[in-house]
Amino acid sequence: MQPRFRIRPERLTDRPAAARAAGVAALALGLEWGRVLAARRPELALASLVVGGAALGALGLGFSARELGLSRSQLGLRLVSGVAVAAVLLLPALARERPGPLLPPPFAVAAIAVSVGEEIAFRGALFAALDAWLGPAAAIVGSSLVFTAGHVLSHPPAFLLAVAAAGVLLATWRWACRDLVAPIVAHCVADLAL
Amino acid sequence: MRGPRAPAALGIAAVAYVLAAWLVTPGFFDGFAPAAPYHWVSPPPDLRSSNQAPSGGRTTVPVQNGAAQAGHLSTGDQQASVAYPSQSFQVPAGGGPITLAVEPVGTYPDLGGIVPAGNVYSITASTPLISPVVVTLRYGSQQVGPPSDVFTAETPTSAWRSLGSINSAVPFTVAASTHMLGYFVVGFPPAAAPTPGGGGGAGGGPPIVLLVAVAAAVLAVLAALPVIAARRRSAGAEPEAPDARPAGVPRNRGGARRRRGRR
């Protein structure tokens, strides 16, 4: 049997798949940067989070639920697993007893919108497009790189390695379990807690 | 085939995440980090090389029908702002405009134990306030978590007092309502000042980070195993698209429907 977890160079010439992956990556990156730039205006901060999260989530409309890793099968188990993945994301902060800023309630709701939108865009749509083009290794690496690039305008450089590592962890889960529910839950919980 | 490589890959990814997240506080931090590095008047030693000077702001509050109009003034770097409802300022005798200014300052009344989490700003107006305005200050330091209060001192010889805080709609800021202009700073009251060695620091060095990394790997793998097992049980004869699909062959979306039709 052909090993699955490798980049498939023979697919590099698949132009439709490449165009689809490049298009999703460009859209996800553009929406993320646009959201961050809009949020720099205080009067647009809340709206940019909600609208930006919704726009990122809309990238998933071009894919089936199965391609995105969304399924109602074993939903309870996936939700519980999401809490466990959230605990993994929070462990470094919990171990050092360093709380992050407390989000005001409107921003907590907005944080959920952005978290769901980012997961659908990066680990859902972009992962699926890259997986269909070059395979899962490229999907994990590529979606994590674009996810990190999406945060260069909002994060100091020192934070980007942690963002990239979180992207790799969530994308690896997405590949290993073929599941996006747990990354969504984990991302939401981590954003609310930090 | 995923096989045992999937849990192993997850464990490795979890360890890598912990090691990367350990380099910054609080770790993975998404979407709500400050838009740009804080601009300090007196930067901490580790930020001196990269620090940019903070900016101020100035505006003219228009007067119409004998009343000062509502508005909003922010510094150029968005680190301090004043929101003023209509009729906040006393109107000058001639009915002319009112000047409002916000400037970061390096000289201010002794903080007396207050631990600042940002610059001290001087907010001045050409006429006195007659009703409250809202001062919002972004903070650049979280030594023991986010700061709680805005403090004010009315003159260079006044003592600082806390204004408390009100809900701020902007992350990484603290806002407070004030009846008087003067000096303003966001920070921690003396009782909440960080103690030496407190707050976790680097978290105790390499042994702790390794323990946390191992714990994260175990947790990630344990969380994944039931999902992977359930997935395999339910997968049955279901093909693992898109991996199983040869290059260039479109997805067979009608297959399941045809199989159901044969039954």
Image (cartoon, coloured by chain):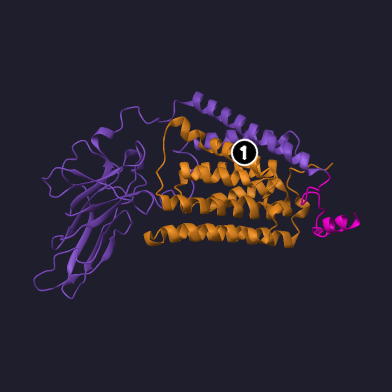
Chain colours: A orange, B purple
Q: Residue furthest bottom?
A: B65
The residue depicted at 55 percent of the width and 39 percent of the height is A86
Q: Residue furthest front?
A: B263
Q: Chain of mark 1?
A: A
The percent position of residue B63, horizontal first and vertical second, equals 19, 72
**Is B24 on the left-hand or right-hand side of B105?**
right
Q: Amino acid at mark 1?
A: Ser
The percent position of residue B122, horizontal first and vertical second, equals 20, 53
Identify the element where label 1 is drawn. Answer: helix
The residue depicted at 23 percent of the width and 69 percent of the height is B69
**Is A21 on the left-hand or right-hand side of B212?**
right
Q: Residue furthest top?
A: B207
The residue depicted at 71 percent of the width and 38 percent of the height is B228
The residue depicted at 40 percent of the width and 52 percent of the height is B36
**Residue for badge 1:** A81
- Who is closer to the viewer here, B159 or B133? B133
The percent position of residue A153, horizontal first and vertical second, equals 47, 54
Q: Is residue B240 magenta?
A: yes
* Count of numbered circles in the view: 1
Boundaries of the magenta span: B237-263
How many residues crowd mark 1 within 10 Å: few (<14), some (14–19), many (20+)? many
Q: Residue furthest left?
A: B93
Quarter assignment of residue B140: top left
Q: Is residue B1 visible?
A: no
